[in-house]
Amino acid sequence: MSHTLGIRQAQKQKTRQALLDAALGLLEEQSLSSLGLREVTRAVGVAPTAFYRHFRSTADLGVALVDQALGSLHPMIRTTVSTADDSEERIARAVELIAHHVDAYPAHVRFIARERHGGVQPVREAIQAQLARFAEEVKAELAEDPVSAGWNGDDLLMLAGLYVDQMLITASLFLETQEAPAGERERVTRVATRQLRLISVGRHHWLD
Amino acid sequence: MSHTLGIRQAQKQKTRQALLDAALGLLEEQSLSSLGLREVTRAVGVAPTAFYRHFRSTADLGVALVDQALGSLHPMIRTTVSTADDSEERIARAVELIAHHVDAYPAHVRFIARERHGGVQPVREAIQAQLARFAEEVKAELAEDPVSAGWNGDDLLMLAGLYVDQMLITASLFLETQEAPAGERERVTRVATRQLRLISVGRHHWLD
DNA sequence: TGTACATCAGTGAACGCGCGTTCACTGATGTAC
DNA sequence: TGTACATCAGTGAACGCGCGTTCACTGATGTAC
């Protein structure tokens, strides 16, 4: 049996998660920079002072959100990249994976896209650090592909970064289609597919 | 002689521009979503109520900032794209152009990168609309290049979007190097150059 | 050119409100014996 | 198992403060004659 939390700790974690969830919800319509501690506690239904039992500030809460949001993006990016090598079919499946992830965790995607260049430094840095880790992982995965024979490390990392950025851009575009007329989603799918294809073509002819 | 403003209108425009400039400065450390009207007027040295003579709200001011910021990005993107076709030299010059633009207008670049996915809807929409216009322009420019012979319109627009996004990402990376150890700038230059090169390679073999 | 009136960018006082933070507290949970 | 004490997540009152917005105002600039 794994470690079981006491009643007290379990309740504390539950409240903490409720604060994180409420914050994520409130961040659909504003930036972390303007998120108020009282807003968050009000949404959860606890006293404002309870906030301090879990976080020093909303910036601190933001850093915690980065881990949760990128924890969910992590498997998506890994799967997408290992899928998106070259064949038409596999690229199409990769784009579908991104679309499904946006459907499953829209608030996470929005949070990362918004705060990646947002006004709260510690959060920005946490996101950059995690994305850099992702790029390293993608690089390692690319390195095992036969297409990468003859590539040096810098170029592999460059390509990995291109994939990670491209995935975030595409995810962000899918997010916008949630409140857009039907058909927009298909358009985004087509554009994203062709962009991945162009990168794939460049990759195959890199050493020509 | 061009139209000369009266003293009153000239002074009004001066104050308006002072408000825009002050806001842009304050936005280096926060998002528009948390920018206060009183902060801005305090920085300029006018009464809070003077703000309403120029803007309905900080969101309204943000939309005005979009025009100014993208007005400065406009020539940069045009020149970069018309430069970045294929040859090694021209790609290198395009990346230099981006770096110089970031040096010249760091606050504009930061503002666009931050608010493109930021928490203020009208500003987000204004940025998306302008970037879409840029992509159309880039598409028109690409269409005249012999390399684009045989390309359909959708694919040209897809490539144009890829260039625009890539430029913003690169500009944003250069921005970060302003407070980073020397050498970071060279690293960003090298990575950006190779990413443009990979896109260029993909472009040349697109119809293979 | 001079005069009388209109315009309107910027003022300053006042308002009600929600903010972040402090503090001493309560009462359920945890621990030692 | 039962008792006595310690811990600590969440409370609720209180604070000083800066916010956005209203309003009637002032005085330099603009306009009509």
Image (cartoon, coloured by chain):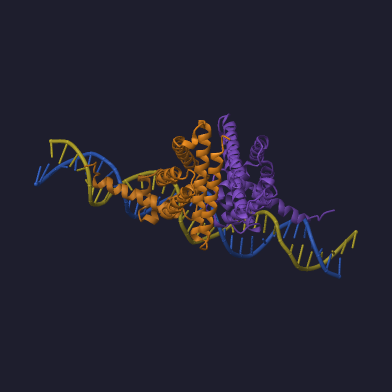
Chain colours: A orange, B purple, C yellow, D blue
Reply above or below: B9 against B105: below
Q: Position of residue C23 (x, y in %)?
A: 36, 44
Q: How many marks are shown on the rendered structure?
A: 0
Q: Can see residue A54?
A: yes
Q: Position of residue B138 (x, y in %)?
A: 66, 49
Taking depth in this image into account, of A114 and A54 the one nearest to the observer is A114
| Left or right relative to A156: residue B47 | right
Q: Position of residue B108 (x, y in %)?
A: 63, 45
Taking depth in this image into account, of A29 and B161 the one nearest to the observer is B161
Q: Quadrant of the N terminus of chain A?
A: top left
Q: Position of residue A204 (x, y in %)?
A: 54, 39
Q: Can see residue A60?
A: no
Reply above or below: B62 against A5: below
Reply above or below: B30 against B123: above
| Left or right relative to B10: residue A32 | left
Q: Quadrant of the C terminus of chain A?
A: top right
| Left or right relative to B81: residue A3 | left
Taking depth in this image into account, of C32 and A181 the one nearest to the observer is A181
| Left or right relative to B68: residue A155 | left
Reply above or below: B184 against A178: above
